[in-house]
Image: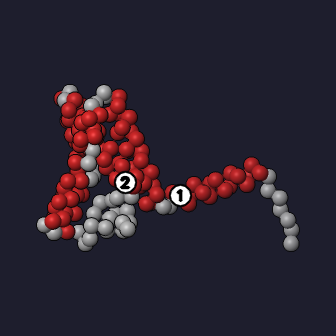
Amino acid sequence: MALYIVPITEYDQSNSNRYARRMLIKPSLLLHIEGGALFALSILFYQRSHGSWALFAATFLAPDLLMAGYLINEQVGAALYNLVHTVTAPVIVLAAGALTSQRAAIALALIWAAHIGFDRLLGYGLKYPTNFKDTHLHRVR
């Protein structure tokens, strides 16, 4: 049996490449990272826009109020939750606010996007109509 000695630099590079490839085939991890990026960028742009932090604190959890739809049934709950937990609506509000110079719309869209990013970072995904804990990321424990 031959012993092959691998230079440290070659070994480190191959291990880091292998580690990077393993990370790229874990969609749940990538969605957590994506959520963290959305959260961080939303906070950064909110701070740069000189938005009110009192408004931020008061409205950050507002999208979760639509979980009340689960009191009706799981389909209504999932539909309402998903409606306010996708980035489409805040992006539209952000674009409209930017095009019309409406600072309040921009601020609310950034807070909304930060909320969605924070949820994804924590592992909360879009809901399936089967059960509140069934999400597109995984089953929440």
User: Farthest left residue?
Assistant: 72
Residue 128, numbered label: none
Q: How was the colour assigned to the protein in this rendering?
A: secondary structure
Residue 102 horizontal side relative to residue 50, left or right: left
Residue at 21%, 40% in the rendered image: 93
Front residue (pair 119, 101): 119
Front residue (pair 42, 10): 42
Along the polypeptide, which appears first: circle 2 or circle 1? 1
Residue 37, percent from left and from top: 42, 44
Residue labelled with disc 2: 120
Front residue (pair 70, 83): 70
Residue 31, percent from left and from top: 41, 55
Residue at 32%, 34% in the rendered image: 46
Front residue (pair 72, 26): 72
Element marked by disc 1: helix
Asked if residue 86 is positioned above or below residue 94 in the image, the reply reads below
Residue labelled with disc 1: 23
Residue type at mark 2 is Arg
